[in-house]
Amino acid sequence: MADCPSTRIGVAGYGYWGSKHVRVLTSLSGVEVTVIEPDEERRRRARADHPGVGVVRDLDDMLDGLDGVVVVTPPATHARLALKALGAKVPTLVEKPLVLLEEDGVAVVEAARAAGVQLMVGHVFAYDAAVRKLRDVIASGELGRVLHIDCARLNLGRYRQDCDVVWDLAPHDISIVAHLLGELPATVSAWTHRAVRAAHADVAHLRLDFAEAGVPAFVHVSWLAPEKVRRITVVGEKKTAVYDDLAGDERLRIHDVGVELPDGDGGTDSGSRVVHRSGDTVSRPVPGAEPLMVQDAHFVDCVRAGTSPATPGEQGLAVVRVLAAADRAASTGTRAAVPRRRTAAGTEWGRRSVEVAS
């Protein structure tokens, strides 16, 4: 029997993340990768890193010969490149954030629908086994009623030219918490600080309020932290879960800690003493493949089978709407509502499982 033809994937952009996508995709069976990169020095580096990979300057040079495109360029270019690929009826994966303007996001989602091809957003942590396990822990009731969620994504980071720290880092936490709770926040409050450059905030704090769950989530993002932090804490009435992305196979821990009010105290300021409870801490091992590997393999599977991705473009657009609300909140000093819109594909977010092979 003849061998099946390779799935031809073009990776637009060979910067920090583009090189990671190329590494992952070239390791997948039956995938032929081409790098699309306008910068000559980066093209030279791509050829040196991957001698067997094709390297071209412009997406137009390759569109007719591709089965899928991964857009990993600066966010300001996402809409233009995605529209070009989708216009050629090529399934497209776009790194987060999907776009920088809501109207561009609407155009990209509609273009995918009109072309009848898949549009996927790179919400990579939806493909992390630890995040999926944390979602299951919350749903099981083990933590009790969730009181609040705290997210910290900090580093002495790379300053971007076309977006601030909120648009760079917060898409991860917004998409993770929406995945955990099965809904988008109803409102956003935001405080930002420009410490180094006047153009873009490099430190920010967000408050996301989730109406159905009745839960606030607090998000701290920074390009100016001395240590790298990638942590989400879910505080429940019974227990607290901590997801630490830097802790390897033990990145999910359950702490049997909490506070309790004496019987008959309904939470009023009655002077009753709060009772602290402290028990064991248990690690929940979550071995599995690298999330980026799982994500990109899922994209290739969707391209081959013609199936819908677990993180469709509508979710990317939904996160863009939250980010835009954060911008409004920061500029006005008030709480901003997140538009609640329906799409032809259904709700923007829901408890759709990301159960893909890992």
Image (cartoon, grey):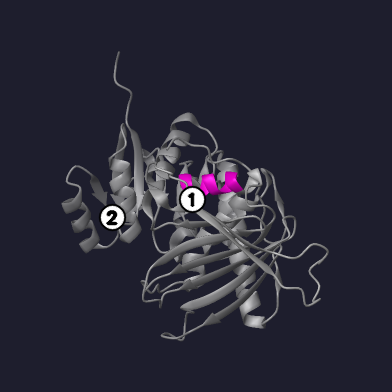
Secondary structure under tag 1 reads: strand
The answer to whether 90 is drawn above or below residue 215 in the figure is above
Q: Is residue 310 magenta?
A: no
Instruction: Quickly name the residue at label 1.
Output: 282
The answer to whether residue 199 is visible is: yes
Looking at the rendered structure, the kind of residue marked 1 is: Val
Q: Is residue 142 left or right of residue 200?
A: right
Q: Residue at x 28, y 39 (%)?
A: 27
Q: Check the image and report above or below for 267 versus 15.
A: below
Is 217 located above or below residue 327 in the figure?
above
Q: Which residue is mark 2?
A: 57
From the viewer's perspective, is residue 352 above or below residue 5?
Answer: below
Magenta residue span: 129-137
Q: Is residue 225 left or right of residue 263?
A: left
Point out residue 200 in the picture as x, y percentages from the top left corner: 47, 79
Camera-side residue: 329 or 77?
A: 329
Q: Nearer the viewer, mark 1 or mark 2?
A: 1
Residue at 50 percent across and 32 percent down: it is 306
Q: Most prominent secondary structure in the magenta stretch?
A: helix
